[in-house]
Image (cartoon, rainbow, N blue to C red):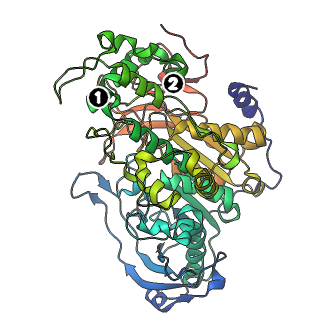
Amino acid sequence: MTQHALFALGTTALLMGCASQPRPAPAPTAIAPVMACEHLAQLRLPASAIALPTRGARITSAQSKAPTEARPHPSNGTWLHALPAYCEVKGEIDPVDRTAPVIQFQLNVPTVWNGRAMHIGGGGLNGNIPANLAVVAASGSPVSAAMPPDVPYPLTRGYALFGGDSGHQGPAGEWALNDEAWLNFAHAGLKKTRDAAVAVLTHLHGQRPRTTYFMGTSQGGREALEVAQRYPDDYAGVMANVPLIGYSAHVVAKTIFATLQTGEAWISPAAAVLIAQEVMRQCDALDGLEDGVISHYRGCNALFAAERGATPYRTIRCVDGASPSAPAGSPARCLSDAQIAMAVRMRSPTAFGFPLAHGHTALPAYGTGREHSGWLNITPQPKVGERPSLGQPGTTVQYGILKDPALNLLDFRLAAHRERIQADSELIDSTNPDLSRFLGRGGKLIIKSSSSDYAVNPQMLTAWYEAVVARHGPGALERHLRYYVLPNTGHAGDGASLTTGKPIPSRIDMIKLLTDWVEHDRAPPDAPVGATMDPHPPFTVRATKPMCRFPLYPRYVGHGNPDRAESYACQHEATPTRN
């Protein structure tokens, strides 16, 4: 059955689902604290308060924070909403292995608490408490590129927020050599942090949260899928934004790509711009509108798929495939055969030759669009035999997966490290399609992806989603899961027309979509409307556009203002062909 057929079947099964679907939660009522915030500073939690093995936890500070008024951000002028009075609690969870780092965590509880709690995921390699425990934002930033700027913060709305550093401090990789620290980073630290935060809330307010959510972006998005798969009893609703699913496969593939980009195969930033322009030339009109935005992302991916070889790049190929001779820093005029072969390689699946967790044998090809903005190029150009700068992927492979900081990754071979890669895939890849426990207790899961995101692999997420649909059926999932894609946007949900520079409307209150679903049984729409808005009062809306459920995409209907959502329809159509 095709994905289109599955989607169509799902939309006719609105009344199907698990029998244990909970009733809508009652309207929030304030729960008064039963002790002063500062008294928590003396609290110690026994190991029995946390389900996974620890030596208990302790509070390191507890401070009452005064309310703040709404104001512009001091550096960028975006609007900061008012914050209520709240209790800021910081603590540490002690590991069983005394050589492992502690897990640092923080809990912010509004004085007027509505009985709900939100667990906020991390980002990158973690190593710090999320910076957005008062303001839920993308990528840990205090100001979000994705949330509408006129939306009050969850803390202001009465939710308690908590998060942790996943069991290490700082970004360096040495901590990953410790097995307990690596397990904490993979998923165990999430459970430990959640249990500790719930115990502290119970001491402060005399009861556990009525409803608990998890929300995360990137690494935090992977963590969101981890808790839905591994700890489903702990959360009523989960929001996974651009999740770094298939983590071990992703970092291994990026390491391989980096080591291949030497000599003539190097795709410079100027060459990436040329590729982006050619992709836009071929794909812009596929959605019915030439506006510098690729909305029909699946059609564009098909046009540049590896099985088409060098054909999509033939109009930008150098004469005779020779190396381009443009001076460094100047615009690229053409690609050499070696660069084209590298581009084709990047849009090919990375086959492992052995199974990873849950049957995956390859990392799917990366998609299209925004190649000019951090596509898989390495800067500066590495010399032959020189180790390229590999960043987070290289650190993860060396320290976390292989446990060998001395290894020269230019010598990395998949077959030689099969056992380590497979073991870590089981720990960290969040690719289990079995959501039976989460669905069985009525859990709600919303996933948002960006089609031109190279910090993660959206196609890996799609492969997992299709496996979930195949396992549970679209009817059951209709009441529990939504998967949306923002076309031609990057990792932060940002994006702009390549030809006009106008931002792609992308600001959507995903928190309200999830909490309304969990607490009021209001299912999210098939096409929430994203907006481009001024970042300060009166928050004027400049443009709107629908964000469609996968596998649909927003197609221009042929008339109407292109800056208005009503000029688009979420549509599915056959893969286009083009010479």
Residue 156 is drawn in which quadrant? bottom left
The answer to whether one can see residue 524 in this image is yes
Name the residue at 37% across, 23% down.
Answer: 338
Q: Report which residue position mark 2 lands on.
A: 301
Name the residue at 39% across, 12% down.
Answer: 314
Q: Amino acid at mark 2?
A: Asn
Q: CA distance from mark 2 to mark 1?
A: 22 Å
SS for tag 2?
A: helix
The answer to whether one can see residue 288 in this image is no
Q: Amino acid at mark 1?
A: Gly
Total marks placed: 2
On screen, 421 above or below 188? above
Residue 320 picture location, percent across and down: 32, 10
Residue 68 is drawn in which quadrant? bottom left
Quick check: 232 left or right of 578? right
Residue 335 picture location, percent across and down: 32, 20
Name the residue at 45% across, 28% down.
Answer: 368
